[in-house]
Amino acid sequence: MPTNLVILAAGQGTRMQSDLPKVLHEVAGAPLLHHAMQAGATLQPDRVVVVTGNGAEDVAAAAQDFDPQVLLAEQTERLGTAHAVAQARTALEGAEGDVIVLYGDTPFVRPETLERMVEARADHAVVVLGFEAADPGRYGRLVMNGDALERIVEFKDATDEERAITLCNSGVICVDAATLFDLIEAVGNDNASGEYYLTDIVEIARSRGLSATAVACEEQETLGVNSRADLAAAEAVFQSRARAQAMGEGVTLQAPDTVWFAFDTVIGRDALVEPNVVFGPGVTIETGARIRAFSHLEGCHVSRGAVVGPYARLRPGTELAEDVKVGNFVEIKNGILDAGAKVNHLTYIGDASIGAGTNVGAGTVTCNYDGVFKHYTEIGAGAFIGSDTMLVAPVKIGDGAMTASGSVITSDVPADALALGRARQENKPDLARKLMERLRDAKRNQSEGKS
């Protein structure tokens, strides 16, 4: 049966104390909204509708960045969750199958949990996701009778007996598309907040002879982000999960609590990650690679057997082939390094390709930017770039070529040639002593004048 998603992302998030819409605050380098969309995407939904509101234009752009086919609906008035879902009616016109309502500020619902909700829908008209809360607080309560869900009651509307219930409402719900909007039409706002609650559809469904049930998940999955403290807690939850998953898949983390993952980090088995490594978005590490301490990687691909760091920075567009060595205080951006190439220390490689087996000496810089345009440096295989070489792009260094230390290279270097691009050295006898004496005299005279 087809599945469709409605993701509510209209909230202002006043407790965040931010000009940024709540769902655009990031966990693991990605907006909260992307996490919710990613969880739902595993169901291969026919249609995905994101309901925007506060910061609608920015939220819509973020949604389209994740899924260009996403459908958008805007809630111009904040009249409650049922009202928000109702805004998706036009986008879901003629949709078949189920609709799952998710929340853009609740990033951790597992795909397996959503699949269990879809399975439960085969036997019930309405399926609600619940959780046993360690501290139920002000959550809405699920009032059960066996496996039948009788109603959902908001905390502010609950009796003392209902407040004693620990099975709480996550807000995530699964209903047949046609039934969903039929039930929403009957929702009223006669409650303490004067809002149209999506949760009321359970009681309305039962009054019409339709069955409802609840599927329970771990409380951690339903963590909602409403404040900066919640955002920090969400980051901690994500990182804990990511570290455990990586180690479970055969990755060695020498100091797990010091390694930070992005939402899409991919690391192959038998890779080794030393302490204090940060993975930004878009990183793939192949099996057997080693990422040494205090390195920062984003938007890059590291092949098997490669070694990165310590204290290395790989920026977007970096491709390291097998057995490449990138050492301390090396930064690479939009650089392609072929098998066995070495860039071991104190070097910047930007907009460049480096051939197999080439060695780049310390202090080398590819001078790729002229203030307006970026230019490319091409270094062939088996080349040797001497320490402190400035490669002024665009420039090509041929296979087997060498540059002398301290050279400024402004022209192409043919294969197997040695390029020297430095001024002739001149020694001035006794001049150093004379200069120092003059400077010391000047300093002494200055001090005496002040006194």
Image: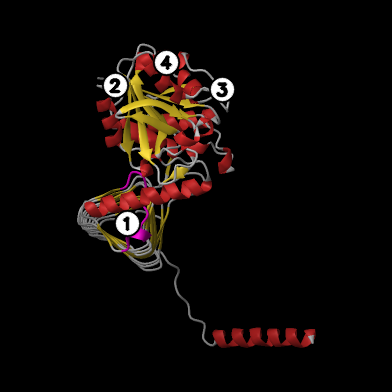
Per the rendered image, the range of residues in magenta is 255-265
Q: Amino acid at mark 4?
A: Leu
For label 2, the residue is 124
Residue 194: which quarter of the image? top right
For label 3, the residue is 76
Viewer-side residue, 249 vs 1: 1
Q: Position of residue 361 (x, y in %)?
A: 34, 66
For label 4, the residue is 183
Residue at screen point 50% across, 32% down: 158
Which of label 4 and label 1 is nearer to you? Answer: 4
Q: In which quadrant is the C terminus drawn?
A: bottom right
- On screen, residue 47 versus residue 246, left or right, reads right
Say if 146 sits above or below 189 in the image: below
First-in-chain label (4 vs 1): 4
For label 1, the residue is 413
Disc 2 to disc 1, C-alpha distance: 74 Å
Answer few, some or many: residues within 10 Å of disc 2's Cα (few below 14, many 20 plus, some between 14 and 19).
Answer: some
